[in-house]
Each structure stands twice: as structure tokens, then as C-alpha cells.
């Protein structure tokens, strides 16, 4: 299986006065299409940098990033925006719903701007929110909000679903449910899902686990037999 | 313990958020500057005027006394308590004529020493008695300058030299007087009734020995503002006090005058008697001289006759002499003839004698021969004897004859001698006679010359005598006339002494000075604008800076929680925000105070300087009350807001502060309950609508901010409308005539008719009407104002030129025989309405009362319209229609000046005033207010910009996360901006709507309190003004949005990953 996502010697250097900080110091990995990938690492290891670069929110200082055969490292701002709106689904740690829009409308917000969206209602039903569609974020629990967030990402029918600590703000049970939803989405729809987390415990559920430390890939392993979320405890 | 870290934090915070600090600073500065600046305009205007009056020593009181003031009266008044100085002066009205013959009524003042100083703008004050300084208005009106001459005439029967020592004056300077700071110059009874301006002469130019006007400077008023209550009170007291004294001063003056006049009469009588006697004496002497001369003349004549006689005699004698001489000559000639005859006879006698002698000799010879023959010849002795005898006889005879001849010769000789002697004596006699004759002739000639001379002398003597006689007659007559006149004058004087009344006094304060009061009205107008306009401005500014502070505290709740958790006391935590807010607000307020209190009053006063010549004395003291009021209010607002939000934050437990604030609940908006509308709205619009209503505070804040600015813009443009519109309304809806032709008052009726005929003939002139216009004083219940009395004999034609539209119901009014029609503002200010009575006066006399029929719309200048019949009923005469109003054909309006010039060529035309000129003048006057309005508009625009910027800034800062999320979701920059703009645009539109409403209300309020004499403002705001205000607001909104676009672009998507803080 050819690599769907491929990072090659990606570096990101911030210059703070005279000090150079290497947030990403030559990261290379590749991911196959339809894989459920977990990128783990301690705080400040460079996971978010990877996510930002992969999500088109930031550009790498050097290196190659290929997503679905496209070299995005050469993209201009405008092309990156297009890349974000058409190819990437993003799930935030703090859900980032527009508080003023209902669940359905939050999903619709994303649909407005993409070419081949999925029907919002269907997606929301798919994430199990058929009864909460017309509620405002403030009326939803954290898990529900995160579901809306996932639905919003999925409805765009992206090529790649990026999740930044999706369970970070959730309690244990809810977190599990969300991970389950993400895993199911990957399995059922063949969506490539990348979850970034500092929680090592969820690594077994992934098809591929990439460990990042000090801006470098410390380890990458492929689980031949990924386990279901339900069996994982942390 | 020094909490260095805390201070460091405050310092860094401020450094980091320079934009916010600056925005709070600017908001406070703008609010305070505008509030205290515009509010300071009124007191500053008054202070400026006060300074002007003080600088140029405007008298506090002006006294007029029907008897005039003498030195004693002036001294008596000066000695009154509360009076620091009194100075008498002269004043009169004259018609001034320049070299081109333009004639204008002017008010002539004698130069004063210490009061009412001139502000000389060009040249110098008059010094000699034939020098004048003229009003700047006179200079510009007549187009004359320094070095030109003016000829004065009284405009009445009276002679200039009764009042002034000369009638021709040279202009030495141009200037302003504190007596006339505005454009108003008052009215007079001469000329066309309107005074063009003042003219200052030297005191010596006036003939009168008494001052006609007395200026009084009150004690200790320099320090007081002349518009203050205290000043008014003091003046009222002083006036009362002076008035109390006036009777006694007046009586003294009366007595003095009476005495003086009586003395003078007595003196006059005496002088008259003396003069009379003297004249008589002189006459008598003259007569005597004449008589003597006559006598001499007679003598001379006699002598002349004698001489003539003598001469005649002499001539006769001469002629006799000549004749005798002639006779003598003839005799002499005869004698000579005789003598020569005698001589001839003598000669002849001698010859005869010779002959005789010869004959004798012959005879003797023959005798001898015969006797000889005897012997010899005895031939015939007989014959010889005979012959001898015969010869003897003959000889004897011859001898006898010879003897006779000899005797005769002797006789002749005697005779000749006698004749010769006679001739000699005759010749001598003749020579003597001739010499005598020559002498006589010479004498005669001399006598004739002498006689001729004598005749000439005689003739001269006669002529001299006749002249002397005529002179005498004339002198006599003259003396008699003079005496009669003197007697008459004395009689009159005697009568007038009887007529001298106790004087009437008028005491006027500065409030009677139109410019003085008008300016305070204008200041009050500024005050009216200053009442609300800056308040709204200030409120908007305060509101926005307060919102900014509140937002800041809310944004930093986590930090506050952290501080609290660290154990910092509330005071320390609050300190940061209070310090932050206060340093920006206090700094801004101070800055605003310092700048605003100078800038705004300066602009406003300078603008008013177009109409009032006070610019040389601009005075802008800091008005600490308004400055402090606004400063404290600005600081207070922010302090309270900051404290309140800090306290709110501090009340919560640190832990809850550290947690993100629960997101505000989304709410359904009322629109959602109208599915018809809601369903039709696109998703993004729905989102925008919801967003709008989500943050109610921000919503109202923005609405009020934009609405307030829009209202200010509307008011600004509206003020401009109301002001600019006046000229349009006046000259397009009320006064429809294009020109005012003044007929030559000296022209005869036929000549004037000719002019009217010419007007009727001209195709360019649509219609015309004769009118009578005069400036009068109109008094009503509340006030006395000057305005035009306007009478027409032809109401139909007049109605086509001046629209008399009832101010109440809009119906057209007609002139009645029993009442007058007043213009609206005049009626308002006089406090009268239809049915009330007003008094119309000229100067202080000839006041008549009349009923008001109706009040009509009019915007500029006050008019009282009345019919000819009504005028006749009031004044008993028919007015002299000296003005013709005319209207050009619409197509020919462009050639009005050409037509006018041709009209002026006609005999009997005097001057033409073009309404277009007047209109331009009015518009330039109103430009002063216009400039003020520009200040308001610019300020409002500036505020609008700052408000919009700030509110947008807050909006974006508040929603950084949301916007970052949108970016992550793949929204293009434009889409993100549109998401925000949509709300802004809706808010701007709503704000504009609110602003229109607010602005209209505000404008109406301001217009209601605007008072400018002779100008009536309307509370009309044009669609254009609303449009342009809305457009400006939108432009500002768009501009701010444009700037915000870059702010939005800068939002880092990484924000979306961060925790909510």
C-alpha cells in the first residue's frame, strides 16, 4: 500500500532572538490510506507542530509533506486554505464550536464552504446526535460537543481527519466514546484518521503509532492487530 | 515590600497593548476635548468680546440729554459714585458722498479721548478738523480708502456748516469701533434710512459747544465680564443711581443754559442797540458826506459852466482878433498895392517926365534948329516963325507939363512915403496881432483841455456820487435787514428761552448696542449647540472606552484568578487595571482639555470673526469648570467601569476564574419564530443575525456608538442645511425679486414715471413694483428690534415679488388698511402674534402703534409690510416711493447686471441693489456658522471612526478563537472577514437608522435654542444630509472593516488549539 501521507525530514525552526528553537527537527514518517494513526509524545515534543503542518495551518521550514500525492510544502496561503477546506477535517481539543450556532448549524457552517459535503443531518445522526441537532453548544455536554465537532469535520468529507487531543477535555467514559466514534469512522468509511495525544494508553487501538520526542520521531510501530477501544483502560 | 513584579506586569501589559492604551487615551482625549472645547466656546466667545470691549474701552453707559452736556454737567456726572470717568462727545447723522457721487448715510462721531477707542486697521486717527477715519464697512461699501475725500450733507434742509465746520473731509484712516462689533449699524431718518457705517472726525469738526452724548465708564468693571450677571447688576444699580442724580444735574444744566441764553439775549440786545446806534451814526456820516459831495459837485458844475463861458468868449475874441488881423492884412495889402501903384505912377511920372524932358529937349533942339534955319534958310520965315512959335508953345507946354508932372511926382512921393510908413506900422501891428493870436489860440486850446478835464472830473464826481448814494441806500437797507434779523433772532431766542424745557435723559447701557447683544446671542447659540452635541459625543466616547476597559478585565480573568490564587490582595490586583485605565484616561483627558479648550474655541471664534471684528482680542482662558467636569466624568466613568468589572471578577473564586467562562448560551432570536423569513435567509445570514443578538451589550454599545456618531453627523450636516438653506428659502420662496432700484429722491415725478415706463418697456424684466422702504424700530411686548418698513401702492405686483405666506397655516396673506404684516422671527422675538399691537418708531421719536394682521414666513431680516392706506392712516401722508423692486425674466437672469447698468443710465435712477449680491453676502456671513458646522462634522467623523475601530477591535479580540476555528475549517480570509463584516454592516445600518432619529431630535433641539438676530433658522434637514451622513458612516465603517481585514488575517490559527482563556 502506497503512502497516503508522507513526511520527509520536516523541520520547523522558530527563531526567538538569537535562539533557534527546533520544534520539528527532521521528522519523517508515512501513513497509508484508511489508517488510524496515533501520534503520541510528551508536551512540547513537537506533536502539535506536526499537526499544524499536516493540517495546513503552518508551513514547514524545510522537508517534504505529501498528502494524497500532493506536495503541500510548496502551497501558498490560499492553496493551503483550499487544502484545509477540502481535504482536511479537524477535531479540536476544546471542540471550538461556534457558540451561537446550533449543532446542526455548526455542521452546516463547514458544509457551506466545501465541494462534496455529506448531508449534515445524516452525519449528526451518524455521530449519535439525532436528538440534539437543534441545541446550542452551551446546551450540550462536552462529549456531545465533541461529537458535533467530529460531525463538522466529517461532513466535509475530508481526505484526512486530524484530531488534536480529542479527549483532552473529556471525562474517561466520554473520551472512550469519542475515540470509538473516531475508530468506527475510520473503519467504516475508510477515512484516514490521525489522533494526536499525550496519552500513551490509547496507542494499542491504532493501526500505526508514531512516538515523537524532542522534535524527532522516536519510534514508529505498526499494530497488526489493533484492539478495540473498549478493551483499553487508562 | 515593593511589588516589583506587579509593576513590571502593569508596565509590560501597557507596552504590549499599546493600541488599546492609545485607543482609550484617544477616546478620552476626543471626548474631553470636544466636550470641554465646544462648551468653552460660549464663555470664550464672551471673554473675547469682553476683552475686545476692555481693550478698546467701550463705555459702560451712554447718556443722551436733550439739552446736551456742558463741562459742569460732565463733571457732575463724573463725580458720581461708581463712575470712574465720563467723556462727552458729539454725534450726528450725515449723508456722505464720495467722488463718484455715491451717497450713503453715516453716523458721525467726534473722536473720543479715552473711551470707545478705535481699532485702526489702516492709516491713522483724524487730527485736523477736516480729517476722518471711516468704518471698514463704509470703506468697502463705497470703495474708498485712505486719501479719498468725502463730502457731507445733512440730507435735510439744514446746512452742514450749522453742525460741522466744513463739509469736505479727507479720509486718514480705516478702522473698527467697539461700538459696532457686528454688521448692524442702525437706522436713521435720512437717506434710505439705513446707516452704512460710522465716521470718526476730530472733535474740532463739530460746531456745537455742547456735547450731545456722554460716555460713562463705570468704576471697577474692567475685571468683570461685561456679559456677567454681576456686571449687569452693577450697571443696573449705577444706571439707577445716575438716574436719581439726573434731575438735579439736569436742572442745573437747565438753569445754566437758561441763564446763558438769557445773558446772551441781553448781551445781544445790547450789542444790537450799540450796533444800531453805530450804524445810524455811520449812516448819518455817510449821508453828510454825500451831501457835501453833492454840493461840491454843484460848485464844480458851475465853475465848469463859467469856464466854458470864458472859453467861449476867448474863442470869440480870438476869432475877432483873427478877423481884425485879416482885415489888417487886407489893409496892409491895399496899402502895399497903393504904394506900388504910387511907385508905378511915380515911375510912370518919371518916364513921362523923361518923355517931357525929351520932348522939351527935342522941342528946344527943333527950336534951335529952326532958329539956325532962319539965317540959312529963310525959306519960309513965316513957316519957321510959325514952327518956331509952335515949338516954343510946345516947349512951354512941355515945361508946364513937366512942372505939373514934377508936382504930381512929388505928391506921389509923399504919398508913397506915407504909404510905406503905414505899411511898416501895419506890418508891425500885424506881426504883434499874429503873435497875440497864436498865444490866444494856445490859451484857448489849454482852456479846452482844462475844460475837458474838468468835465471828466465832473462826470467822475457824479458817478462817485451816484455810487455813494447807491451804497448808502444799500448800506442802509442792509443795516436795516441785519437789525431786523438780529431783532428777530433775539425775539426767537427770547421765545426759545421760554421753550427750553427741563432736559430729558436717556441712559443706555451696553445692552442697547446691537452688536454687543447680538454677539452674546451668537455665543448663546454656540452654548445651545454645546449643550447637547458634545454631551452625546462625550457619552459615546466614554461608553466606548469604558467597554474597552471592561473587555480587558474580562479577557484577563484567568490572570486575575492566578493572582488571587497566588495570594495577592484585591487592591493589588485591581491596581493594575485601575492604573492601566487611569493612566490612559487621565492622560487622554488632560491632553483633551489642553488641546480642546484651545482648538475648538479658536476655530469657532475665528469663524465668528467673519461677522464680528473681535479677532484681534481672542481670549481663551481655560474654563476649568467644563474641563474638570468632562475630565472627571471621563475618568470617573472608566474608573467605575474598571472597578466594577474587577470586583465582579474578584468576587468569584480563583478556581472558577481559572476555568474558562462558560460560553454564553446561544439563543434563538425572534426572527426564527417567523419561519417565512428565517427559512429564506441563507445560513450565513442566520449566523450573523444570531451573533448580533448574542452579545447584547456589544450590540447596544455598537448601535449606540454608531448611532451617536451618525446623529452627530446628521446634526452637523443638518445645521449646515438649516443655515445654508436659509438663503435658498429666502430668495427662492419669499423674496422673488432680483433687484431693488432706488429712484433719485430729487428727481421729479415725470422723471420717475419715465423710469417706471422704461422698466415696463424692457423685455428682460418680468414684473416690478414701487415700494417704500425704511429702516425703523419695531417694539413689541418683549423687545425692540430694527427692521424694514415696507409699503407698496400696488399689492398685486408686490405679491408677485414677495410671497406673504402665513407662517401658521401657509395661506397667502393680503395687506389690509388697518393692520400690518410682520415677519416670523420679528414676531417671535417681539413676543407678538396676529391681533397684538406693535409700535413703530424712527429713532426715539415719531412712534406709532398699529395692529398686527398676520405673521408671514421670512428667514432673513425683519420686515413690517403695510398697505398704502394703512401708512396714510398712521402717518397722515403718502410715502415717497423711492424704491422699485423688479424681477428679471427667468431666461434673462444672467444679464441682470447689464440691464441694471443700462437702467442706471436713465435720469432719475439712483442705485440698484442686486439680490444676487445680497444673497452672496448673506451666504458669506452664514459661512461663519458653516465653518463651525464643519468642525462638528469633522469631529463627529473622527469619533465615528474611533468608535467603529474600537468596537470592531473588541469584537475581533473577543472572537479570536471562533475566527481562528473558521480559518482552520478552511474559510478563506475574505470569507472570515465577510462573516464578521456582515454583522458590522447590519450594525452600521441599524446604527444609521438610530442616528437619523437621534440626529433629527437633537437637531430640532439645537435649532430651537439657536438665536441669531435677523436670521430665522429652520429645522430642516435635507435628504442629502441624511444621505451624506449615512454615507460617511458607511465609509468609516468600510474603512475600519478594511483595516480590520488585516487584523483578521493576522489571527493565528493556532489560537484555535489553545485553551479558552
Image (cartoon, coloured by chain):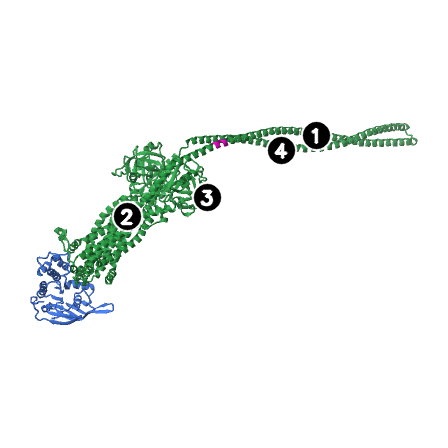
Neighbourhood count class around disc 4 (C-alpha, 10 Å): few under 14, some 14–19, many 20 upward: few
Marking on residue B406: none
- The label shown at residue B453 is 4
Tell me, yes or no, whether the two marked residues, 4 and 2, touch with CB atoms within 8 Å: no
Q: In the rendered image of this protein, which colour is used for chain A?
A: blue
Quadrant location, the C terminus of chain B? bottom left
Q: Quadrant of residue B886?
A: top left
Local secondary structure at mark 2: helix
Subunit bearing disc 2: B
Point out the stretch of residues depicted in magenta.
Answer: B266-271
Q: Residue under mark 1: which chain is it in?
A: B
Residue B537: x and y in percent read 25, 51
Q: Nearer the viewer, residue B890 or B213?
A: B213
B542 displayed left or right of B883: left
Q: Which one is earlier in the sequence, the residue at label 4 or at label 3?
A: 3
* Label pair 4/3, CB-CB below 8 angstroms: no
Q: Is residue B270 magenta?
A: yes
B595 drawn magenta? no
N-terminal-most mark, 1 or 2: 1
At mark 3, the secondary structure is loop
Residue beneath label 3, please?
B128
Q: What label does residue B530 carry, if any? A: 2
Q: Chain of mark 4?
A: B
Q: Is residue B267 above or below residue B654?
A: above
Which residue in the structure is indicated by mark 1?
B321
**Mark 3 in CB contact with mark 2 (< 8 angstroms):** no
* Location of residue B655 with respect to B456 vertically, above or below: below
Instruction: Identify the main secondary structure in magenta.
Output: helix
Dot 1 or dot 3: first in sequence order is: 3
Amino acid at each position: 500500500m502506497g503512502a497516503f501521507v508522507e513526511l520527509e525530514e520536516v523541520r520547523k525552526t522558530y527563531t526567538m532572538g538569537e535562539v533557534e528553537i527546533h520544534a520539528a527537527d527532521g521528522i519523517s514518517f508515512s501513513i497509508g490510506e484508511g489508517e488510524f494513526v496515533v501520534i503520541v509524545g510528551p508536551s512540547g515534543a513537537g506533536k502539535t507542530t506536526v499537526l499544524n503542518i499536516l493540517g495546513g495551518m503552518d508551513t514547514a521550514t524545510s522537508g517534504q509533506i505529501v498528502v494524497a500525492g500532493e506536495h503541500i510544502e510548496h502551497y501558498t496561503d490560499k492553496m493551503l486554505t483550499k487544502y484545509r477546506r477540502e481535504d482536511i477535517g479537524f477535531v479540536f481539543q476544546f471542540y471550538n464550536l461556534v457558540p451561537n450556532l446550533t449543532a446542526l448549524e455548526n455542521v452546516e457552517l463547514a458544509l457551506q464552504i466545501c465541494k462534496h459535503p455529506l448531508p449534515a443531518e445524516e452525519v449528526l445522526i451518524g455521530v449519535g446526535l439525532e436528538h440534539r441537532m437543534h441545541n446550542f453548544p452551551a446546551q450540550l455536554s462536552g462529549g456531545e460537543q465533541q461529537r458535533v465537532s467530529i460531525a463538522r469535520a466529517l461532513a466535509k468529507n475530508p481526505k484526512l481527519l486530524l484530531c488534536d487531543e480529542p479527549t483532552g477535555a473529556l471525562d474517561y467514559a466520554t473520551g472512550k466514546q469519542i475515540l470509538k466514534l473516531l475508530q468506527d469512522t475510520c473503519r467504516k468509511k475508510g477515512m484516514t484518521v490521525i489522533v494526536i495525544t499525550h496519552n500513551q494508553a490509547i496507542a494499542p487501538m491504532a493501526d500505526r503509532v508514531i512516538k515523537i520526542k524532542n522534535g524527532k520521531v522516536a519510534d514508529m510501530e505498526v499494530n497488526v492487530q489493533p484492539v478495540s477501544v473498549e478493551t483499553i483502560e487508562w | 515590600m515593593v511589588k516589583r513584579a506587579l509593576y513590571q506586569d502593569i508596565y509590560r501589559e501597557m507596552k504590549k497593548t499599546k493600541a488599546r492604551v492609545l485607543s482609550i487615551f484617544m477616546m478620552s482625549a476626543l471626548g474631553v476635548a470636544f466636550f470641554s472645547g465646544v462648551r468653552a466656546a460660549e464663555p470664550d466667545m464672551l471673554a473675547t468680546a469682553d476683552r475686545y470691549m476692555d481693550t478698546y474701552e467701550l463705555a459702560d453707559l451712554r447718556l443722551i440729554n436733550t439739552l446736551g452736556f456742558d463741562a459742569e454737567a460732565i463733571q457732575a456726572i463724573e463725580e458720581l459714585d461708581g463712575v470712574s470717568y465720563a467723556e462727552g462727545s458729539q454725534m450726528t447723522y450725515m449723508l456722505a458722498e464720495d467722488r463718484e457721487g455715491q451717497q450713503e448715510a453715516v453716523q458721525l462721531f467726534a473722536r473720543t479721548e479715552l473711551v470707545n477707542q478705535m481699532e485702526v486697521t489702516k492709516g491713522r486717527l483724524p487730527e485736523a478738523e477736516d480729517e476722518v477715519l471711516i468704518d471698514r464697512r463704509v470703506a468697502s461699501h463705497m470703495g474708498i480708502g485712505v486719501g479719498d475725500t468725502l463730502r457731507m450733507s445733512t440730507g435735510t434742509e439744514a446746512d452742514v456748516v450749522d453742525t460741522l465746520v466744513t463739509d469736505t473731509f479727507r479720509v486718514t484712516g480705516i478702522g473698527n469701533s467697539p461700538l459696532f462689533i457686528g454688521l448692524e449699524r442702525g437706522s436713521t431718518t435720512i437717506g434710505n434710512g439705513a446707516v452704512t457705517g460710522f465716521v470718526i472726525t476730530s472733535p474740532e469738526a463739530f460746531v456745537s459747544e455742547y456735547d450731545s452724548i456722554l460716555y460713562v465708564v463705570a468704576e471697577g468693571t474692567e475685571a468683570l465680564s461685561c456679559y456677567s450677571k454681576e456686571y449687569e447688576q452693577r450697571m443696573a444699580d449705577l444706571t439707577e443711581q445716575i438716574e436719581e442724580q439726573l434731575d438735579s444735574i439736569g436742572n442745573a444744566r437747565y438753569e445754566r443754559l437758561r441763564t446763558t441764553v438769557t445773558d446772551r439775549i441781553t448781551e445781544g440786545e445790547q450789542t444790537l442797540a450799540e450796533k444800531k446806534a453805530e450804524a445810524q451814526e455811520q449812516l448819518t456820516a455817510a449821508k453828510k458826506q454825500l451831501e457835501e459831495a453833492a454840493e461840491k459837485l454843484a460848485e464844480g458844475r458851475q465853475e465848469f459852466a463859467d469856464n466854458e463861458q470864458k472859453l467861449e468868449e476867448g474863442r470869440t475874441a480870438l476869432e475877432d482878433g483873427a478877423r481884425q488881423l485879416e482885415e489888417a492884412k487886407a489893409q496892409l495889402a491895399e496899402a502895399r498895392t497903393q504904394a506900388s501903384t504910387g511907385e508905378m505912377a511915380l515911375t510912370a511920372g518919371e518916364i513921362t517926365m523923361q518923355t517931357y524932358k525929351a520932348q522939351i529937349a527935342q522941342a528946344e533942339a527943333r527950336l534951335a534948329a529952326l532958329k539956325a534955319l532962319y539965317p540959312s534958310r529963310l525959306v519960309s520965315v513965316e513957316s519957321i516963325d510959325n514952327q518956331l512959335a509952335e515949338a516954343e508953345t510946345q516947349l512951354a507946354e512941355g515945361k508946364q507939363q513937366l512942372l505939373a508932372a514934377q508936382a504930381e511926382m512929388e505928391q506921389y512921393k509923399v504919398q508913397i512915403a506915407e504909404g510905406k510908413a503905414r505899411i511898416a506900422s501895419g506890418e508891425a501891428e500885424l506881426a504883434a496881432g499874429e503873435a497875440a493870436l497864436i498865444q490866444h489860440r494856445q490859451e484857448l486850446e489849454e482852456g479846452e483841455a482844462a475844460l475837458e478835464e474838468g468835465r471828466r472830473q465832473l462826470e467822475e464826481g457824479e458817478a462817485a456820487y451816484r455810487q455813494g448814494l447807491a451804497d448808502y441806500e444799500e448800506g442802509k437797507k442792509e443795516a436795516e435787514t441785519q437789525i431786523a434779523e438780529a431783532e428777530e433772532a433775539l425775539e426767537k431766542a427770547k421765545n426759545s428761552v421760554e421753550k427750553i424745557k427741563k432736559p430729558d435723559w436717556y441712559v443706555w447701557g451696553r445692552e442697547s448696542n446691537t452688536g454687543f447683544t447680538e454677539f452674546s446671542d451668537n455665543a448663546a447659540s454656540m452654548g445651545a449647540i454645546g449643550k447637547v452635541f458634545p454631551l452625546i459625543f462625550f457619552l459615546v466616547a466614554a461608553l466606548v472606552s469604558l467597554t474597552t476597559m471592561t473587555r480587558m478585565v474580562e479577557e484577563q480573568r484567568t490572570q486575575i484568578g492566578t493572582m488571587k490564587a497566588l495570594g495577592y490582595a484585591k487592591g493589588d490586583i485591581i491596581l493594575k487595571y485601575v492604573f492601566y485605565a487611569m493612566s490612559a484616561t487621565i492622560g487622554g483627558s488632560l491632553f483633551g482639555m489642553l488641546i480642546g479648550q484651545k482648538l475648538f474655541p479658536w476655530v469657532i471664534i475665528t469663524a465668528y470673526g467673519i461677522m464680528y471684528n473681535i479677532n484681534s482680542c481672542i481670549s481663551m482662558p481655560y474654563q476649568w469648570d467644563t474641563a474638570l467636569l468632562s475630565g472627571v466624568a471621563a475618568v470617573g466613568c472608566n474608573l467605575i467601569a474598571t472597578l466594577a468589572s474587577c470586583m465582579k471578577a474578584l468576587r468569584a473564586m480563583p478556581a472558577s476564574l481559572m476555568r474558562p467562562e462558560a460560553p454564553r448560551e446561544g439563543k434563538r432570536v425572534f426572527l426564527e419564530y417567523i419561519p417565512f423569513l428565517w427559512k429564506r435567509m441563507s445560513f450565513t445570514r442566520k449566523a450573523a443575525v444570531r451573533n448580533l443578538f448574542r452579545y447584547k451589550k456589544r450590540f447596544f454599545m455598537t448601535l449606540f456608538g454608531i448611532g451617536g456618531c451618525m446623529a452627530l453627523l446628521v446634526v452637523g450636516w443638518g445645521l449646515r442645511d438649516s443655515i445654508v438653506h436659509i438663503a435658498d428659502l429666502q430668495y427662492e420662496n419669499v423674496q422673488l425679486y432680483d433687484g431693488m432700484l432706488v429712484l433719485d429722491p430729487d428727481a421729479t415725478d415725470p422723471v420717475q414715471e419715465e423710469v417706471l415706463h422704461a422698466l415696463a418697456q424692457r423685455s428682460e424684466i418680468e414684473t416690478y413694483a414701487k415700494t417704500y422702504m425704511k429702516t425703523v424700530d419695531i417694539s413689541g411686548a418683549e423687545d425692540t428690534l430694527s427692521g424694514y418698513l415696507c409699503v407698496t401702492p400696488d399689492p398685486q405686483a408686490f405679491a408677485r415679488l414677495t410671497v406673504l405666506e402665513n407662517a401658521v397655516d401657509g395661506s397667502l396673506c393680503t395687506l389690509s388698511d388697518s393692520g400690518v404684516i410682520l415677519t416670523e422671527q420679528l414676531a417671535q422675538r417681539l413676543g407678538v402674534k396676529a391681533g397684538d399691537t406693535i409700535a413703530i418708531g424712527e429713532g426715539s421719536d415719531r412712534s406709532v402703534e398699529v395692529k398686527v394682521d398676520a405673521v408671514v414666513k421670512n428667514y432673513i431680516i425683519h420686515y413690517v409690510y403695510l398697505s398704502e392706506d394703512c401708512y396714510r392712516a398712521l402717518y397722515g401722508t403718502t410715502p415717497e416711493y423711492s424704491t422699485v423692486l423688479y424681477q428679471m425674466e427667468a431666461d434673462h437672469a444672467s444679464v441682470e447686471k447689464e440691464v441694471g447698468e443700462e437702467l442706471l443710465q436713465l435720469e432719475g435712477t439712483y442705485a440698484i441693489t442686486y439680490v444676487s449680491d445680497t444673497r452672496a453676502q448673506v451666504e458669506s456671513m452664514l459661512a461663519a456658522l458653516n465653518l463651525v458646522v464643519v468642525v462638528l462634522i469633522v469631529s463627529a467623523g473622527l469619533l465615528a471612526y474611533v468608535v467603529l475601530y474600537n468596537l470592531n477591535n473588541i469584537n475581533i479580540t473577543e472572537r479570536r478563537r471562533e475566527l481562528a476555528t473558521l480559518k482552520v475549517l478552511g474559510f478563506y480570509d475574505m470569507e472570515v472577514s465577510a462573516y464578521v463584516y456582515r454583522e458590522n454592516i447590519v450594525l452600521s445600518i441599524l446604527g444609521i437608522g438610530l442616528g437619523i432619529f437621534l440626529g433629527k431630535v437633537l437637531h430640532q433641539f439645537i435649532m430651537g435654542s439657536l438665536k441669531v438676530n435677523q436670521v430665522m433658522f429652520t429645522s430642516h434637514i435635507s435628504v442629502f444630509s441624511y444621505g451624506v451622513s449615512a454615507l460617511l458612516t458607511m465609509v468609516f465603517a468600510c474603512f475600519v472593516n478594511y483595516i480590520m481585514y488585516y487584523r483578521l488575517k493576522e489571527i493565528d490559527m493556532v489560537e484555535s488549539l489553545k485553551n479558552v482563556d
